[in-house]
Image (cartoon, helix red, strand yellow):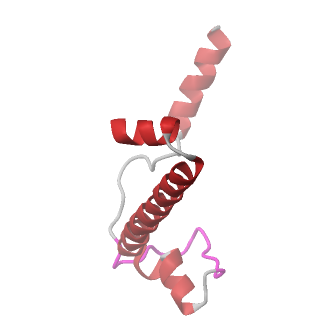
Amino acid sequence: MIREKRTLLLGSDKVRDEFITEWRQNCVNKVCELFEQVTDAERAFFGLKSYFYLKDLGEEDRAFSSDDDADRASPTSEGIVHGFKNEEEIDSEMSIDEEE
């Protein structure tokens, strides 16, 4: 950490640019590695309805209607899906806003 700080603050332009280029490349590599984990998890969870599975087949634009049966090969999720609220939570938030 101290070496990095000295390089950025006290290093020559060339040394600083080399450091930043290496740091950026390292970040890109890490993001690509992690994205592979995300795609693997998405494929495992959604099975034959996985976006990435369908993309590999060239069918990523295929739409599923809300009445499609769930893929039996995929695990089911219980409770709230991250990022989505149920009606009860929305109603309670609205009532809190009205009280203020």
What residue do we see at 59% from left, 48% from top?
A: 13
Determine the residue positioned at 44% across, 82% down.
48
- Between 71 and 25, the one nearer to me in the picture: 25
Quarter the C terminus occupies:
top right
Regarding residue 76, the answer to whether it shows in the image is yes
- Which of these two is toward me, 81 or 94? 81
Image coordinates for residue 77, horizontal then vertical, percent: 36, 58
Compared to 95, does 71 lie above or below? below
Is residue 38 shown in magenta?
no
Camera sees residue 1: no
Residue at 64 percent of width and 82 percent of height: 62
Residue numbers of the magenta segment = 61-74
Identity of the residue drawn at 35% across and 35% down = 2
Left or right: 15 in relation to 75: right
Residue 20 image point, x, y percent: 52, 52
Residue 66 counted in the magenta span = yes
Q: Which quarter of the figure has residue 14?
A: bottom right
Quadrant in which the N terminus is drawn:
top left
